[in-house]
Amino acid sequence: MVAALRRTPPALMIVSLAVGLAACWSTRTLFGVLAPLGAVFLYARGYWLLAAWIGLLIAFAASALAALFYPGAIREAALSLGALVAVAAYIGLLLIPASLRRGNHSAVPRRPEPGQPEGLGPVPAHGAIHPDDRAAIAHAAAYAFWTGVPQVTGYRLRQPDGSYHWTELRAEPGYGVSVDVDAMISRPDDRWSVAESLGTTMEAVKAAKVIESLHGKAWAFDAMGRFTYVTPAAQVAIDMALEDLNRRLGEREFIDGGEAGWMRGVHPDDVDRAASTLRHCLKTGEPWNIEYRMLRATGQYVWHRISARPTRDDNGQITGWFGTSIDIDVYKKTEAALRAREQHLEQLIDTVPAMIWSMTGAGHPVYLNRRMMEVTGATTETVTAPDGSLTLKRMIHPDFLEQAERTFARSVATGAPYAIKYLQRRADGTYRWTETRAEALRDEAGQIIRWYGVSVDIHDLITTQTELHLRKQELTRLVDLVPSFLWRLTPDGAPNFFNRRFIDFLGLDEGSLEQPQTEQYAAALKAAVHPDDADRVWAGLKACLSSGRPFAMRYRLRRHDGVYRWMDGRAEPLLDEDGSIIQWHGLSHDIDDQLRVEEALRESERSLRQLVETLPALIYCAAPNGEPIYRSEKLREFLGFGLADKDEEGTTRLTGTLDAIIHPDDLPDVKERYAHSLATGSPYAMKHRLRRADGAYRWVETRTAAMRNAEGEIIQWNGICFEIEDQVRAQEALTLTQERLARAAQAASLAELSASIAHEVNQPLAAVVANSHACQRWLTSDPPNLERAQKTVERIIRDANSAADVVGRVRALFRQTVEARNLWQLDTILHEARDLMLEEATRRRIRVEVDVEPGLPPLALDRIQIQQVLVNLIRNGLEAMEPAQRGALHIRSMRAGELIRTEVRDTGAGISAIEKVFEPFFSTKSHGMGMGLAISRTIIESHGGRLWAEDNQPSGAIFIFTLPVEAKADHDR
C-alpha cells in the first residue's frame, strides 16, 4: 500500500494532509503540518518547489520579527513557529532528490529521438548506468514509444568516485500525443519477483525477453496458465508480483474454471471474458488476442491489448506461452477524442444557422446537413438525378431554375466560385429568398476534388431592402410635401439639396440649370436673404460650421414674387462615429403669418393688462389646485409683497398666502369655503377682512369663479376683491340705529301693554278689595254674620275669576296661531338662522360655527317658530360675547335616542340665575323686556320638546333644547 501511495503523489498528499490535520487537532500544535510539508518536498518540482521554499523563508522571517518586537505570549508563539519552520526546512533538504540538490534540475531538457529516454537531467552515458538497470531503462524507452505513455523509472548512476547513487529518468514517446495521460512511475524499492524455476517454459521466457526488448513489457506462463516470468516494470505497473499473479483464489486450478490472482487486476466488466477466452486458448492452443481494462498501481483501469502465443516441443505439445500487453490507453483516449471531435463537428454543421452541402468535383451531391434537410425537406436522393448529377427542380422556384442550373454548370466547368440569389422552396411549400455560395476544394495538383456550399436565408433581408426602398420613395415624397423648406449643406457650408417646396419658393428652374447644382443653390440662397439680415445670417452660419454648434436664427427670405417673408431657420450637424461632421441638415419654416398674429396677440394682451391694472378692484388668478399664479399691480401694492415672497419650505404657496393676509378670526371660514369651491368647482364668494400693507385689516368682498376648457375641466381660477370697508361701517351704523328704534318701539309697546293690563285688571281687583273689607266686617261683628260673609266670599271669587280672564286675554296677545306643521331638516333651519344673523355676527366680529351630525331624520315642526327660537338664542349669545369682539359661537345638533338635541354655546360672561331667565319680564340686559326666552320655551314645549340652560366651561352659557323625532303639538298648554 505504501508503494502504491508513493506511486500516486495526489493520494499521498491527501493522506499526508489528513494525518497532519489529525495531529494538529490532537496535540493542539502545528506539529502535524510537517507531514504534508514532507510530501510537498518529496514530489514538488520546479516552480512548486521554489514556492515552498519561499513560503518557509517568509514564515521564518515573520516569526523572527514577531519574536523581536512583540513580548509575552506573541513572542513564545513566534519562537515556536520559527522552530517548526527550521525543522520543516531540514526535512525538505533530506527529502529533495540528490540529482536536484546537485543542480541537475537546472539542465535544459532536450526532445529525444523516438524511442530514446529523456531523463530528469541529461541522459548519462551507457557506461555510467549500473549494469543491472540498463535493461530497465531500455524497456522503459521501448514501452513509452509503443504506448505513448511516459515512463519514469529509477536507476543507479555511477558517481565520479565510482559509487552508484539512485536517480530517476523519464522516457517520453518521442512523438506528439493529443490527449493527457499520466506517466507510469517505478521506484527502486518497488516490489517485483522472478520465478524460482522456469520449468518447461524456458523457450517461452526466451521469446518473452525478445519481445520485451522490442515492446518494453512481456511475460510467460506455463500450459496451466501460471506465470513464470513477467517484466519487472510490468509487475510494478500493476502492483502484482509473480506470487500475486499466480495465487489461486479457490480450490480449483484456473484452467479448470478456478480463479487466479491476476484476475483481480482486470476490470469487473471484462474479467469473465478475459478468463474464459484464456482458458479456451490454453485448452486448444489457439492464439490469445484480447483487449480489456487492467488495474494500474495508481488505482486506475487502463485499456491494454494482449496477445499470447504457445511454445511447443518436438512432439507438438504446448510447453508454455509467451506474450505481451501493450498499454492502449492513449489510443483509446485519442480514438474517443476523435469521435467526440467528429461528433462535435457534425453537431456544429447541423446546428449552424445555415444550410451546408457538398458535391463531388463533377457536381454530384454527396452531403446535405440536417438544417438543409429540415428546412427544404430535401435529401441527397431527391436532389440527385438518375445519372448522379444535381437536379434542383424540387428546390428552386421555376422562375429561377434555369438561371441557377446554368450558373452552377458554368462554375463546375470553370471552377469559378458559385453565387446566386433565388427563391427556394421550403418543406411547407412556401418560397423564401435564399443566397447560395460555393467554393471548390482542390488537391495539390489543382484538381477540384470537392465542392462545399452554404445557403443562407436572406428573405428578411430582401424584404427589408424592399421596404426600405419603398420607404425611401415615401420619404422623398414626404420631404417634398412637408409644409417647410428642407435643405442640406456640405461640411463647408455649400448647399447641395433643396426640397421641392423650397425650390418653388425661390422660383428655381432645375431643368434650365447650366451650372452645377451646388453653385446654383448657393447663388439663389445668397440672393434671397434680405440685405438687412445677410451679414447676421452668414456670420452665424460660419460660426456654427466652424464650431459644430446647432444653427438657429430668424431672418427674411425673398419669395419668387419679390415679397420678403420671415423664416425660422434651424440646422443640426450629422456626425460619423468619430464625431466628424458629414453634412448639415436644415429646416426653414415660414413664420411671417405667425409673427403677425403674435404681434396682434401681444397688442391685445397689452390692452387687456392695462384694462386689468386700471380696474378699481384687486384681481388675482390661481391654478386649478388653488395655488396663486398672478396678482394685479393694485393687489400687490395693497398686500405689500409679490407672488413668491411668502413661499416657505414645507408649506404651499396658497397656505402661506392665506395665513399672511386673512384676519385670524376669518381664516377658518375662508379656508373652509375656498377648499369647498376647489373640491366642487362651485363659485366662491365671501366677505372677510384682508390685511393691508400697513398692517391694518380692511373688509373686502371676494368672488372667485373657475375658467374651464372645452371639455369642462378647470384650467384656472379667476378672482376679484372689492374693498367694502366703508359699506361695512355704514351698515354697522344703520344696524345700530335700527336696534335703537326697535328698543324704543319695544318700550312703547311695553308701556301700552302695561296700561292695558292696569286698565283691565284695575276694576276686578278694586271689587275684590271692597268685598274683602265687607267680609271682614261681617266676620268681626258680634255675633258674626256668617250668611253675609259667605255671600261676600262668593263675590270675591267672581271678581278674581274676572281678573284671571283679563290676564288670559293679555296672554293671548303673545300666543301665535298654530299652523299646520311639515317635515323639515333641522340642519336647513340652523343654516337659515345663521345666515339671518351672519351680518350682525360679522359686525360684532364673531364667527358662527354650525356642526350638524350627518343623517339626522326630518322633523314635523313649524319652521318659522323654530327659526324664531334659534334667532333669539343666537342673538342672546352674540350680545353676551360682544365685549370681547372675537371668538366663535358654536351651534351643534345631534341625535340623543328618540330626541334631536341642539346646543347654542357662547363664551360670554355667563348667567348668574339660570332658572329665572325663562320667567316672563326677567332680563339680565338693561334694555331687555324679559319675554324672549319665555316665549321660546313656550314654542319648544308646544312642539313636545324642552328648553333649558347650563353653564359653559370655562366661561359662557349653553342653551339646549330637544325635539322629539315624531313631534306632536302640545294642545293642552
Image (tube, helix red, strand yellow):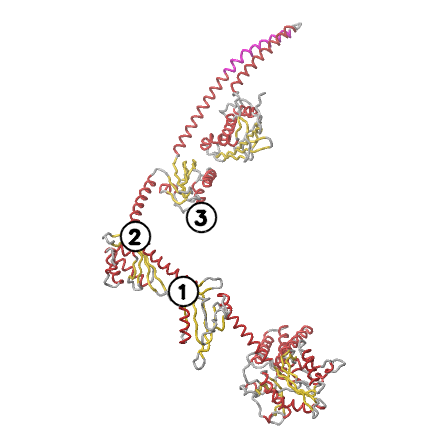
Circle 3 residues within 10 Å: few <14, some 14–19, many ≥20: few
Q: Position of residue 584 (x, y in %)?
A: 32, 61
Q: Position of residue 792 (x, y in %)?
A: 61, 8
Q: Amino acid at mark 1?
A: Asp
Q: Position of residue 143 (x, y in %)?
A: 60, 86
Secondary structure of the residue carrying tag 1 is helix
Q: CA distance from mark 1 to mark 2?
A: 53 Å
Question: Residue at the spot x=65%, y=90% of the render?
Answer: 207
| Res. 736 visible in picture | yes
| Mark number displayed over residue 648 | 3
Q: Which residues are magenta?
A: 755-780
Q: Nearer the viewer, mark 1 or mark 2?
A: 1
Q: Classify 922 as above or below 714.
A: above
Give the quadrant of the N terminus.
Answer: bottom right
Q: Quadrant of residue 971?
A: top right
- Depth check, front residue: 496 or 133: 496
Instruction: Name the residue beneath numbered marker 2.
Output: 590
Instruction: Name the residue beneath numbered marker 1.
Output: 399
Q: CA distance from mark 3 to mark 2?
A: 46 Å
Q: Are the residues at dot 1 and dot 3 in contact (C-beta closer than 8 Å)?
A: no
Of callouts 1 and 3, the N-terminal one: 1
Q: Amino acid at mark 3?
A: Glu
Q: Amino acid at mark 2?
A: Asp
